[in-house]
Image: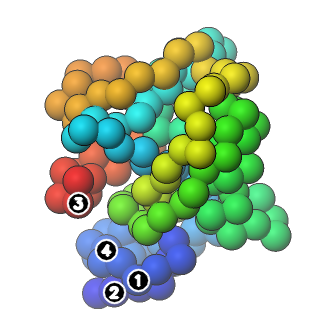
């Protein structure tokens, strides 16, 4: 079955369709690539996701679309502007209720980062990411990313 979500049509499993019917909250992740590697960042310590690696992004706030939320998050967390491209993957996860996570391709206007929510960043292959302490929600994107990257 194909549903509309994350700003574009995409296919979901029956399980994800049932979960998606009750979702009101959305999050976005930006996936930048370089030489078959993906941009990841390690969150500052503290909180449920502290010290874990992630694809940067965050919650879509009221009045925002996915692209504007990603641009805001990258400005806040890295001090850089990005261009948001096409949808790469989507997942449903649990965090204070059901959430939908939409991952988009992003490119950097500059790599002069000012880290505010992360301690470090790096480029990593999907295989390297699978061995890292990665946030649960972003782990759910990995199977789909293997098919599109």
Tag in front: 1 or 3: 3
Q: Position of residue 101 (x, y in %)?
A: 50, 57
Q: Earlier in the sequence, mark 1 or mark 3?
A: 1
Q: Position of residue 145 (x, y in %)?
A: 27, 53
Which residue in the structure is indicated by mark 2? 2
Q: Position of residue 139 (x, y in %)?
A: 34, 40
Which residue in the structure is indicated by mark 3? 148
Q: Earlier in the sequence, mark 2 or mark 3?
A: 2
| Residue drawn at 36 percent across, 68 percent down | 16
Tell me, yes or no, if residue 88 can be seen here: yes
Q: Earlier in the sequence, mark 2 or mark 4?
A: 2
CA–CA distance in space, label 1 to label 3: 15 Å
Colouring style: rainbow
* Vertical side of 143 occupied by 88: above or below: below
**Pointer 1 with pointer 4, Cβ within 8 A:** no
**Pointer 2 with pointer 4, Cβ within 8 A:** yes
CA–CA distance in space, label 1 to label 4: 10 Å
Q: Position of residue 90 (x, y in %)?
A: 40, 62
Label 1, secondary structure: give it.
Answer: strand
Which residue in the structure is indicated by mark 4? 12
Label 3, secondary structure: give it.
Answer: helix
Which residue in the structure is indicated by mark 1? 9
CA–CA distance in space, label 3 to label 4: 15 Å
Tag in front: 2 or 1: 1
């Amino acid at each position: 079955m194909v549903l509309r979500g994350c700003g574009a049509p995409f296919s979901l499993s029956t399980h994800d369709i049932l979960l998606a019917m009750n979702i009101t909250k959305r999050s976005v992740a930006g996936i930048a690539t370089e030489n078959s590697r993906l941009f990841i960042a390690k969150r500052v310590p503290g909180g449920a996701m502290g010290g874990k690696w992630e694809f940067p992004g965050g919650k879509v706030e009221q009045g925002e679309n996915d692209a504007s939320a990603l641009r805001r998050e990258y400005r806040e967390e890295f001090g850089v502007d990005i261009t948001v491209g096409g949808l790469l993957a989507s997942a449903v996860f649990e965090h204070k209720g059901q959430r939908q996570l939409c991952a988009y391709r992003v490119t950097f206007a500059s790599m002069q980062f000012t880290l505010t929510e992360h301690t470090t960043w790096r480029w990593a292959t999907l295989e390297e990411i699978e061995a890292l302490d990665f946030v649960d929600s972003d782990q759910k994107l990995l199977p789909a990313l293997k098919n599109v990257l």
